[in-house]
Every structure is written in C-alpha cells, then in structure tokens.
Amino acid sequence: MKLKIFSLFALAVGFTALASCDTDTEAIEVQKPLTYDEQYYKDLRDYKKTDHEICYVYYQNWRPLEGVSGYKDPASWGERFCGLPDSIDIVNTWLGIPTKEEHPVAYADMKYCQEKLGTRFVMHADASHYRHTVPVLDEELNPVMKLDADGKQVYDESGKPVADTIFLADNVNEDNLKYYARYAVKQVVDAEMDGMDWDFEGWSSSNLLPVIKECYKYFGPEGKWPEKLIIVDYFNSSPSGEMNPYCDYLIKQAYSGQGAGAYFASGWDTKKQVMCEAIHQKPNGGNIESYAAWQKGNKGGCGGFSIRFNYNQDRLGVPYGALRRAIQIMNPAVKK
C-alpha cells in the first residue's frame, strides 16, 4: 500500500512540474557565415590584376589520394578550393584537372574562384621523364589520323578511325616535343584552366625550351589565348634563362626541409621568381613568412607546396594562417 501511495504522489508531482514548465518558444540565434558584398569581390579581382608579389600554391586536397581517380565528396573546407584564402593568386591543381563529369564539386568551386575571386588555376605539366603517350595534333590542335604503310586510314575493331599517337621516350626529337606541348595546351583550353606549370625535374633545358616556345605560340601575346600562363618550376638545377622571355613565372622549390632556400636563378627576371616552401614537411608554415619578407618588392612572390597541411596545423591555430600572414607581409591590406 505504501508503494502505491508513493507512486501516485510521484505521478502527481510530475504532472505539476510539467504544468509549470515554460512552453514559450525561445528564439535561437544561429551564427551565419561571413559574407561580402559585390564591391569586395570587385576590389579583390582588381587587386589580382595589379603588379604585386603573388601567392602561388600547390593544392591537391580537392580530389582523392594520389593514384586514385573518381568522385570525392568533401568533408570540410580544407578539401575545397572555396576554402582557400581569397587572396591566393594562382592554384596549381597538382594531381589532375577538375572536370564537370568526374569532379563536380571541385569543378564548380574552380569556376566560382575564377569568376568571383579572380583566382587562376594552372595544370601540372610533367618534365621529369619522357614516358608519355601523346596524341599527334596539328597546329590547330586537331588530331592527326593514323595511316598504315600504304598511307591509308587505320580503323579500330568497331570501324572508327584511329588517331595517331607517339611515345615520347622512343624518340625525343623536336617534332615530338611540339606534339607534347600542343597536347598540354589542348588540355588547358579544354578544361577552361588558366595555364600550365612545367615541373622541370629530370629533363634537359635543351628539350624543355622547344616545348615552352611551342606553348608560347598559343599563350603568348600573339597567340589565340594570350591571357593564359606559362610557368616553370624546379628544385635543383634551374632551367636555362633562354626560357625567360616566354614564361610568366619561375617557381623555386625552396623546400627548407630538404636543405633548400631562397635564391634567384641566373638569367631570369627576378620579378618572375617565386619562392615556395614545402608545407607537407613544415605544416606550421616553415619558412614561408621569411620568404614573403625576403627581397620584398624585387621578387615574383612566395607560396607553398601541399598547402593543405597548413589548414589545421598552423602554429597560431588559424586555418591557412602561415599563408595568410605571408600574403599580408608581401601585400598589406589597405585599411579604410
């Protein structure tokens, strides 16, 4: 009987408590992301068109790991182009080319950054080895069809005409190097990118020079796409200064973790030369801020390889903090 009386008492207390609760809806204020007006974006685009020391980054976190193809569903802003600092000038997409079909999020982000922020995106072009199968393209970048020994068109098993290709390593001559250059140009144009960066780590300058000259026919001031960039990057031996007139920038892999540092390559305009730190070796930024201050006003700029590691490992806990500070050192924000 005592148990029943206690249960009834507890139930009554419960109903009383519920009846006394405040049932009014309380407004919850949700913090909205920081947004900018159109004047901000116009000012940003105008700034990137000025003569200033640029920020150049290699960024591969937009897609799956190296050697893995396919779609990536980003889990954070550290995996998206839109999560990069607005004031970055040029992004090297490193592991590949974002396409609308295979990388819809990365492609949409790239287009947004190009159009809204004025950020330029360049393709990584390999000049470290010659093991490349290359389509034969004419000067209009159209495929040349494959002919047999009698000069007749070759067809595949389904009856489609076969386009001709070359394996560069079989014969590294000037004609084949030009085909390789045209192939790179076509990739950039087809992907709506802003240029290419030739990774000079194994080739001779005598072989890279005709490639650069061929690209210049299309991307130089007299070319069909004069707004597009021709860039060369290197680690040890610098490429010949003969390429200087045909290139927009020369990127020095000044990776302090591998004993490298900032210095100018001879034969090149100093204001084209950009010093990059290896952020995967120094996630807190390494020497990037020192590079920003080095030869201020006399160099092309600074930046970093694998900049994604600075997203959440900055020494001050700021996403891409070292990169942001480097940009401010080179180009202090104008306070109104």
Image (cartoon, grey):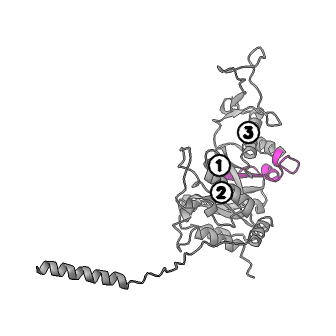
Identified by mark 3, the residue type is Tyr
Of tags 1 and 2, the one toward the viewer is 2
Check disc 2 and give the amino acid type.
Answer: Asp
Q: Earlier in the sequence, mark 1 or mark 2?
A: 1
Q: Which mark is residue 98?
A: 1
Mark 3 or mark 1: which comes first in sequence?
A: 1
Res 43 quadrant in image: bottom right
Say whether residue 32 is magenta. Answer: no
Q: What secondary structure is marked by label 2?
A: helix
Image depth: mark 3 or mark 1 in front: 1
Res 60 seen here: yes
In percent of width and height, residue 100 lies at 66, 47
For the C terminus, the quadrant is bottom right
Please report the residue visible at 78 percent of the width from the left and 68 percent of the height from the top. 42
Q: Disc 1, disc 2: CB below 8 Å? A: yes
* Picture coordinates of residue 161, whole percent (x, y): 72, 23
Q: Quadrant of residue 86?
A: bottom right
Whole-number angstrom distance, CA of label 3 to CA of label 1:
17 Å
- Residue 109: mark in rendering: 2
Q: Of all residues shown, which one is farthest toward the left?
A: 1
Where residue 109 appears, as percent x and y from the top left, is 65, 57
Which residues are drawn in magenta? Answer: 218-246
Judge whether 162 appears above or below 271 on screen. Answer: above
Residue where numbered disc 3 is placed? 183
Asked if residue 223 lies in the magenta stretch, the reply is yes
User: Visible in this render: residue 293?
Assistant: no
Compare marks 2 and 3 and give the one earlier in the sequence: 2
Q: Circle 1 — which element?
A: loop
Residue 203 location, x and y as percent? 67, 42
Residue at the spot 75% in from the left edge and 31% down from the top edge? 136
Which amino acid type is shown beneath numbered disc 1?
Answer: Pro
